[in-house]
Image: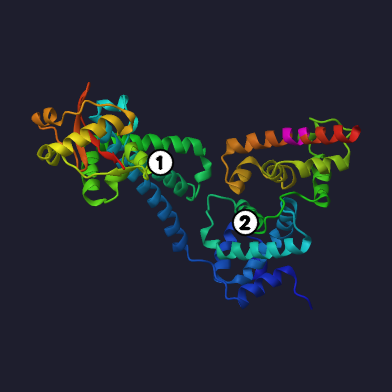
Amino acid sequence: MKPNFNEKIINRIREKNIFPKPKIFFILKNISFWFFSILSILIGAISFATILHNISDKKELFQNFSYLPIFWIFILIIFLIISINNYRKTNNFYKYNIYFIFIIIIIFSFILGVLMFSFGVGEKTEQLSQKYLPFYEKHQRITDLKKEIFKDKLIEIGVTSEIIKENPKLKEKIDKKFRENVLGKTYLYSPEKCLEIEYTCPKNSIPFLDNLGCGCRTIYLIK
Amino acid sequence: MNLKDIQKKKDEEIIKYILESPDYYSVIISRYENKLRNYVLRISNTSRDEAEDLLQDIFIAVYQNLNSFNQNLSFSSWIYRISHNHVVNYWKKNKKHERVSIEQNLFFVETIFNENSIELEINNSLNNKEINQAFSEMDKKYREILILKFLENKDYQEISDILQKPMGSVATLINRGKKNFIQEYKKIHNETKF
């Protein structure tokens, strides 16, 4: 006799040795989604704290958006998305409007980010990134992205203010190129004046002076 | 405990017995076999044979995931949710055209127009063929929610649990679904008229 639907299912379960998955599997699955969601919010908050650190002492930001720390903005956006995606895989996620949850996560990340910034987490993250992330210096600002875009036309020269000071010819050359070519903007290049007030710049960049005061610029040379 | 005693129990209570022996699962299968078969046929563009295979896979998936059943949900909502997800995955895998066949749309004709909700909003001189076509042309997201509301007789809370959408969105989708249906119907009706 042909088995009915009911028997077909029971037979299939028996023949193929199908068992219900253990409860712990589902508990761990749910916990892991919550864990990664919270972890992503934390990473997002650290990114926000670092963004605040990067822009907090830059008056030039309002004149030149090349100062925007795009690396951290990118990390912040990525981890906010990961956080929301993980949240969507938890039980009962659908009981609340996803846009409402999105706004809550953003607000929470930003508040946490401001707190972390006030405790110096942003500064520490910036220092650690410069120290341990080899690609970090190159990709953290829009100017560096522009360098990527024009990579067949521009080359970077690794100069520090010390080298320029000791090498007047190089100084002259860079000064000329800097005036002519750096992103189409002309700055009054006067590192000595900035060095007098012990204005220091990170590796691969030099001090310059404009109407707002001393700042740092990465140097590129046209091929 | 024998099968007859189990049959008197609620779905949620039967789960712990099924976890001891799969034989008790036959009680759940008997309760939901026809309901889910109709539901699968209504929301998927499949033949009866394909729907039968899908249904078998659904019952196996339900059995495998018994331990994930959340006691805050009704068992019925949970089993419908698994069926919905299975059909959606089936669409994705097979890239099926997500339309209901005319034959299956007869369910709508027979049932929805016995309901007052849509009947009140459109006139009585409706043409069955046009109704079927209008349902076929409807957006999938509205069609399924109308099936759950008017054919499966689910309340807002159950639909929210099955489709995993907030309650507010369910109410909105039902209203939009009705409007979408009327719009499609009018479009088809005007085309055939001229």
Q: In the rendered image, which quarter contains the C terminus of chain B?
A: top right
Q: Position of residue A10 (x, y in %)?
A: 65, 72
Q: Which mark is residue B89?
A: 2
Residue at 66% in and 42% down: B155
Amino acid found under the numbered disc labelled 1: Ile
Residue at 36% in and 39% down: A146
Nearest to viewer (mark 2 / mark 1)? 1
Mark 1 Cα shell of 10 Å, populated few (<14), some (14-19), many (≥20): some
Determine the main secondary structure of the stretch shown in magenta. Answer: helix
Q: Position of residue B143 (x, y in %)?
A: 71, 43
* Residue A169, magenta (yes or no): no
Residue B1 visible here: no
Q: In the rendered image, which quarter contains the N terminus of chain B?
A: bottom right
Q: Position of residue B154 (x, y in %)?
A: 68, 45
Corner quadrant of residue B112? top right
Corner quadrant of residue B45? bottom right
Cα distance, mark 2 to mark 1? 29 Å
Residue B158 visible here: yes
Q: Which residues are magenta?
A: B179-183
Q: Report the residue marked by disc 1.
A: A77
- The subunit carrying tag 2 is B
- The subunit carrying tag 1 is A
Amino acid found under the numbered disc labelled 2: Asn
Residue at 62% in and 51% down: B77
Mark 2 in CB contact with mark 1 (< 8 angstroms): no
Per the image, label 1 sits on a secondary structure element best described as: helix
Q: Is residue A168 above or below residue B144?
A: above
Per the image, label 2 sits on a secondary structure element best described as: helix
* Residue B182, magenta (yes or no): yes
Q: Is residue A109 above or below residue A22?
A: above
